[in-house]
Amino acid sequence: MSTSERLIESTRELLWERGYVGTSPKAILERAGAGQGSMYHHFKGKPDLALAAIRRTAEEMRAATGKVLDGPGSAYERIEAYLRRERDVLRGCPVGRLTMDPDVVASDELRAPVDETLDWLRERIAGIVEEGKERGEFAPSLDGEEIAAAVVATVQGGYVLARASGSPAAFDAGVRGLLSLLAPRGRRAA
Amino acid sequence: MSTSERLIESTRELLWERGYVGTSPKAILERAGAGQGSMYHHFKGKPDLALAAIRRTAEEMRAATGKVLDGPGSAYERIEAYLRRERDVLRGCPVGRLTMDPDVVASDELRAPVDETLDWLRERIAGIVEEGKERGEFAPSLDGEEIAAAVVATVQGGYVLARASGSPAAFDAGVRGLLSLLAPRGRRAA
DNA sequence: GTCTATAGGACGATAGAC
DNA sequence: GTCTATCGTCCTATAGAC
């Protein structure tokens, strides 16, 4: 792997673990096994390297999540597959956690990939909900975009509950709770 | 207000705005209008001051949220009141945001008030859901603790969506989505 | 392209005067 | 109780050798 690749990968890991404010160039260089010169040769500075790292993380998340949402099954089953997807719950969401970073939110450039990814995810799920309504899986009164927002928020908030308690249990409980509310008519008492 | 009070209040503000890692003693002292000596006289250091600040924020959150949940109305209405409660959405949750702070999560002492507050909130809401089930407001198949986790997660995740997009709209959408799923039978199509 | 050296400032804490 | 002075380290970036 090239030095610039190692820098990006190290930055991705550290952004996930410690956020933008908590990640120093020094820590990145140590993890990547590179010197100062390499970093400032390939990137303009910390924000520029972070942007490359965030963009890649956002891309990967879209690719992986897209696969799950494009899977087989009914609308409910595909949303369930997304919610129950295997996750390293206690590590949190590598994209969502950046919204709690003051320097990321303050920068339109750094925030953009985060915004685009979560927006894409909501629209994708909204489409599936609308599909489910057409098929009679979901009540016609439901709003696709609202349900999608609730689904994504349950996941993002689930990470918060899990990290607060130091256990994935609360994340799983929230997912089960939402699914029990979302379950197609006829399956509700199942 | 005493110096030690000003230090705690300044720390609370900065923890909310910038998190623990992003908040320096220097910034606290500037905001409080105090010198180094005052801080180290009243507190052992940054972690000690942060602990006092976090504890107070947690207490206030419980008091304010308790009032909303103890309000009048049906189980659904009280949960709705909590979800629709007036919030500075783009500022995020002063308690929940701390779960994304690596140094807070790494410290059992700093994490404890966060954990206790979110746990208390979930239990409180779970009780209301169980009440609602007894009254026939909610389907008996629903699990109080699971619904409570979904409710709290929707709020915490709503902050994430809102901060990502720079607008409270996604938070509100998630809340409406969850409420539409939770609406008592007979009110669903309303 | 990568390294080390160096810079000026901030970080978190301590010492000691008042 | 509060202040300033000082400390050693880390932060982000630049310079310049190789």
Image: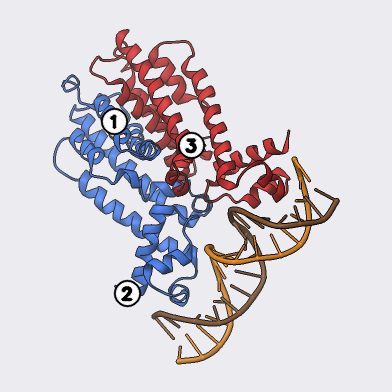
Chain colours: A red, B blue, C orange, D brown
Quarter residue B43 falls in = bottom left
What residue sits 62% from the left and 50% below the top? Answer: A25
Say what amino acid the circle numbered 2 marks.
Ser
Between A50 and A155, the residue placed more toward the observer is: A50
Q: Is A164 left or right of A140, judged from the image as shown?
A: right
Quick one: label 3, few (<14), some, or many (20+) residues within 10 Å? many
Crowdedness near tag 1: few (<14), some (14–19) or many (≥20) residues, C-alpha within 10 Å: many
| Above or below for B168 versus A20 | above
- Secondary structure at badge 1 equals helix
Letter of the chain that mark 2 sits on in the rendering = B
Q: Position of residue A53 (x, y in %)?
A: 58, 37
How crowded pointer 2 is (Cα within 10 Å; few <14, some 14-19, many 20+) is rated as few
- Residue B118: give x, y in percent of width and height: 37, 45
Viewer-side residue, B135 vs A112: A112
| Alpha carbons under labels 1 and 3: distance apart | 26 Å
Mark nearest the camera among 1 and 3 is: 1
Mark whose residue sits in front, 3 or 2: 2
Q: How far is mark 3 from mark 2, CA to CA?
A: 41 Å
Q: Residue at x 34, y 23 (%)?
A: A180
Kind of residue indicated by mark 1: Ala
| Element type where label 3 sits in the image | loop
User: Reading the chain from its start, which is encountered first: label 2 or label 1?
Assistant: 2
- Asked whether the residues under marks 2 and 1 belong to the same chain, the reply is yes
In the orientation shown, which residue stands out farthest toward the left? B72
Which residue is denoted by mark 2 in the rendering? Answer: B2
Kindly identify which chain the residue marked by label 3 belongs to: A
Residue indicated by mark 3: A168
Instruction: Name the subunit of mark 1.
Output: B
In percent of width and height, residue B80 lies at 22, 36
Q: Nearer the viewer, residue A25 or A181?
A: A25
Q: Which mark is residue B173?
A: 1
Tell me the quadrant of the picture where the C terminus of chain A can be found: top left
